Image: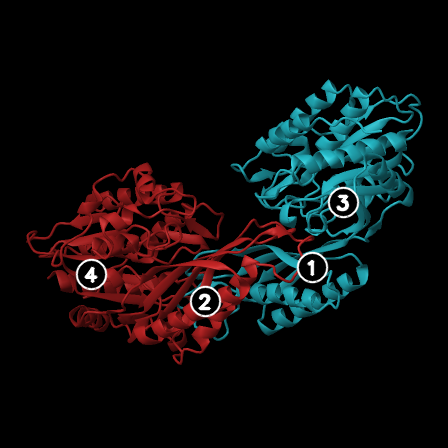
Chain colours: A cyan, B red
């Protein structure tokens, strides 16, 4: 059957959450545990209560909002995503999956559905690596891929520990209790914008994700020698910026030379010190992101980048310190959950394609503890992580309809 | 004769001013109009009053502390420098010339000298371009090289106008009154650390500066296209960081290829947006500093850099906006003032060499309105703009002795 999705409720939720931002519109900035994040969480808690859901939050701030099923002892079916947003990005990445899951639950309730399994909305903490350098913090911890000790060693760029930050935001439950056992959920489904141009190009409303690309990220600290830009002659300079510049270009070259058209590599973070026009840069910090849907070309690229760093720093007399922030295996989606999504597309009459996700998502880690798949909806020109990120209300309604139908099928 | 210079007073003044810093020791950060700058100014005002000097401040915060001569209607002889310091730099750059001039005046008074001309200590506002992008702000305005209108159009990196900033620091006199007429001073002498290794290498205590290098600085804003680092494939990316990286390397190349061993070119400022590991950089801001003691190789380098920017941005589909922050002519020092310094070296028995200044100084602009020259003292390994910048107390005393003798000769 077709559940009635309320487009105006979805749009209102998206607009309200977009307004909780530390940058002016249309850009959205919502860093984990910031005031904007806290306010958006308060809004969502209130909306979950209105929808009759039972709330729980763990020590990281992962939020669980449960609609109790008729057989509450059975493992629940879960759906959700994240609401944190990198600096000056858009309103759809992550948030569509949270408000979509909430509206799917509301639609099922309005239709009088009484599911056997409980259905749970999940809000994951800090999918974006902006503040603590690690992506999918909440789902990574949930799935046991990050231990309590590892979490406790994380600090942000200003030297605050994650522990201070979470306590400051009111999350103080023991971190050892964050991990959930395999079998805790019967299934997990995440609705998300594609963040690429494929559905728009094909004119299709729905993508069914069969695999999620494998990301690797490194942080690189370069130490050269500062000095007065006017007084120190060129030969023998040890300029950290110039080494960083060569490395950023080598990263691009390695991705283009990997042999796989799917390899992407980006130096997204690049900061120099002291950062004055008349001072030779003495220090640079780079963060580099390398991905492919297959692990081999990604790891070859990573290796090529590492080799280039070594050669460049040796030649320019720069000391370097390289940290592998993460290098996660790709995820394959569950055939059973994929089948439920495909069946939902058929019963809602929406065309779809099977596809891979080039961006990573909380589903990458949920796939480690339960059967998982994702539903993609188109976004304009494939643009994401920018203020002009856009998904149409119609496409979001379609994705939410497929999600509602999928959840109903999985919950029985 | 030899005036008695008090080493402990000099050291105490240097230590006190170093403590007014917004970064922890040994680094010094003293940005114009910041709290650290304000506190250091208050300290100096007090020390000038103790020395019996009459104070005046103009609308930019340039400080004039005058010891009235026996013929006060004659143009005064002036000496001084700046106390602002770039992020995480040292305690000697600029400050030595301010506390040195103050101690030279104290030494002359202790010796019972009664000069014909008044002797004036000058403290120039914002010699460093860190905050407003323009070096030698105070002396530039004093000399008329910057109009009141141009000053009023300056803003800092956070969008504060110079006008707001100076008012906030308590300097509100009209900017139109900052410029001093040619003939206002009989001479200007600036004591400064060399900021290069030449005196140390030669084992000489004093450098007499005969010319000051010609700096040019440009600001470059690059605009590309952001996007998700995982989802946007490599071909067709418009990554602002990569264009900036190529440009920084082209700047280095242009300096090395200028044909003059004295050409230096530095990208000292480099900031990207949004600056998240998983986002393609959409915008970059660079500040580039190009210098030579002769204007021709410097201008050729600037031209080569400009050409490279155009080629790189064209190839990478990056829009750019280039602003020439300054491109000042070099200064030649005055033979009469040089002669007085050389005579002072002879009467104090200190060996010296004639040399050029590769760094620019407030003297570059004072030379436009009065006969000007500089006295250099050695600094360790030629290091400057770094926390480990160092000049020995003995060398600072020697430079101050030469300054005192020079001022006595010039003031009659």
As helix, strand or loop, the secondary structure at mark 4 comes to strand
In the picture of the structure, the residue carrying the numbered disc 4 is: B188
- Is residue B23 in sight in this rendering? yes
As helix, strand or loop, the secondary structure at mark 3 comes to helix
In the picture of the structure, the residue carrying the numbered disc 2 is: B310
Looking at this view, is A362 or B406 the one in front? Answer: A362
Neighbour tally class for label 3: few under 14, some 14-19, many 20 plus, Cα within 10 Å = few
B395 shown above or below B285: below
Whole-number angstrom distance, CA of label 4 to CA of label 1: 59 Å
Q: Chain of mark 2?
A: B
Expressed as whole percent of the image width and height from the top left, the position of residue B95 reads 34, 55
In the picture of the structure, the residue carrying the numbered disc 1 is: A264
Q: Does residue A203 appear left or right of residue A112 in this picture?
A: left
Whole-number angstrom distance, CA of label 3 to CA of label 1: 28 Å
> On the image, which quarter does residue A98 sit in?
top right
Q: Does residue A198 appear left or right of residue B356 in this picture?
A: right
Looking at this view, is B191 or A123 the one in front? Answer: A123
Which numbered mark, 3 or 2, is in the foreground of this view? 2
As drawn, the residue found furthest toward the front would be A349
Whole-number angstrom distance, CA of label 3 to CA of label 2: 47 Å
Looking at this view, is A14 or A318 the one in front? Answer: A14
Neighbour tally class for label 1: few under 14, some 14-19, many 20 plus, Cα within 10 Å = many
Callout 2 touching callout 1 (CB < 8 Å): no
Whole-number angstrom distance, CA of label 3 to CA of label 4: 61 Å
């Amino acid at each position: 059957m077709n559940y009635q999705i309320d487009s105006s409720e979805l749009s209102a939720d998206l607009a309200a959450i977009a307004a909780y931002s530390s940058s002016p519109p249309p850009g959205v900035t919502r860093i984990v545990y910031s005031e904007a994040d806290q306010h958006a969480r308060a809004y969502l808690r209130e909306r979950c209560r209105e929808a009759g859901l039972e709330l729980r939050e763990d020590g990281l701030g992962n939020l669980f909002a449960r609609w109790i099923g008729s057989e509450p002892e059975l493992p629940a079916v879960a759906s959700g995503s994240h609401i944190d947003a990198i600096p000056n990005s858009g309103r759809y990445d992550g948030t569509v999956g949270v408000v979509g899951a909430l509206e799917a639950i509301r639609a099922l309730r309005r239709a009088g559905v009484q599911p056997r399994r409980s259905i749970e909305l999940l809000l994951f903490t800090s999918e974006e690596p902006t503040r603590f350098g690690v992506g999918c913090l909440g789902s990574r911890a949930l799935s046991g891929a990050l231990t309590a000790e590892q979490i406790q060693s994380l600090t942000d760029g200003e030297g605050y520990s994650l522990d201070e930050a979470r306590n400051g935001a009111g999350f103080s439950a023991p971190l050892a209790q964050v991990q959930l056992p395999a079998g805790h959920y019967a299934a997990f489904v995440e609705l998300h914008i594609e963040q690429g141009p494929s559905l728009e190009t094909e004119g299709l409303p729905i993508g069914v994700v069969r695999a999620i690309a494998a990301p690797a990220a490194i942080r690189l600290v370069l130490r050269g020698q500062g000095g007065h830009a006017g007084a120190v002659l060129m030969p023998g300079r040890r300029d950290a910026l110039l080494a960083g510049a060569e490395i950023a270009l080598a990263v691009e070259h390695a991705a283009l030379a990997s042999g796989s058209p799917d390899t992407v590599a980006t130096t997204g973070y690049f900061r120099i010190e002291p950062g004055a026009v008349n001072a030779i840069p003495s220090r640079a910090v780079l963060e580099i992101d390398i991905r492919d849907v297959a692990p081999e070309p990604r790891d070859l690229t990573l290796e090529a980048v590492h080799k280039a760093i070594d050669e460049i720093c040796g030649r320019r007399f720069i000391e370097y310190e390289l940290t592998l922030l993460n290098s996660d295996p790709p995820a394959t989606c569950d055939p059973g959950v994929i089948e439920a999504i495909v069946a939902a597309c058929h019963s809602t009459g929406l065309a779809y394609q099977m596809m891979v996700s080039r961006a990573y998502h909380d589903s990458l880690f949920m796939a480690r503890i339960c059967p998982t798949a994702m539903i993609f909806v188109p976004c304009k020109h494939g643009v994401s992580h920018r203020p002009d990120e856009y998904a149409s209300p119609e496409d979001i309604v379609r994705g939410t309809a497929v999600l509602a139908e999928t959840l109903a099928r999985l919950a029985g």
